[in-house]
Image: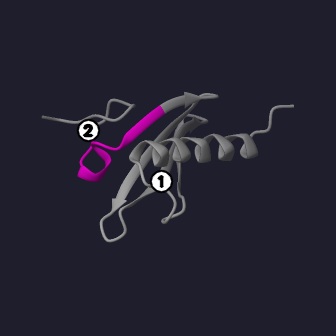
Amino acid sequence: MVYRNNFGSPVSNSSWRDEVKGVLYRDYHVIGVAHLLGKTGYWVPTVRVRWRDAGTDQQFELTGPQNRFRTKEDAEDYAVSMGKDWIDKKNPIP
């Protein structure tokens, strides 16, 4: 089976397969990911933001706190929120 991300591209890293939450926000693709820290039992949120600028693919990635989220869903939601906040700071709406 081939897993695909929100852009239709194959996903090769197994840690991104099962813990992905993606949304389209202000023409940016926001992908929230949760990684389980086995030694602590906490989920770590990571967001990957993708967009096109002048015909070129761009990407930004940010990782959140490591000792805050006990559920995958909470970490994914936080990751998406981090991405939206980053977009809003990068491109404020007048």
Q: Residue at x 40, y 50 (%)?
A: 34
- Three-letter amino acid code at the position of disc 1: Pro
Residue 58 is at least partly visible in this image = no
**Residue range highlighted in magenta:** 11-22
Q: Residue at x 30, y 66 (%)?
A: 38
Check if residue 15 falls in the magenta segment: yes
Q: Is residue 37 left or right of residue 30?
A: left
Residue 31 in the image: x percent, y percent?
46, 40
Check if residue 24 falls in the magenta segment: no
User: Which quadrant would residue 65 be assigned to in this image?
Assistant: bottom right
Q: Residue furthest bottom?
A: 39
Badge 1 or badge 2: first in the primary sequence: 2
Give whichever of 32, 52 is nearer the camera: 32
Q: Which residue position holds label 2?
A: 10
Front disc: 1 or 2:
1
- Three-letter amino acid code at the position of disc 2: Pro
Query: Which mark, by number, is residue 45?
Result: 1
Q: Residue furthest right?
A: 94
Residue 50 in the image: x percent, y percent?
51, 40
Residue 53 in the image: x percent, y percent?
60, 37
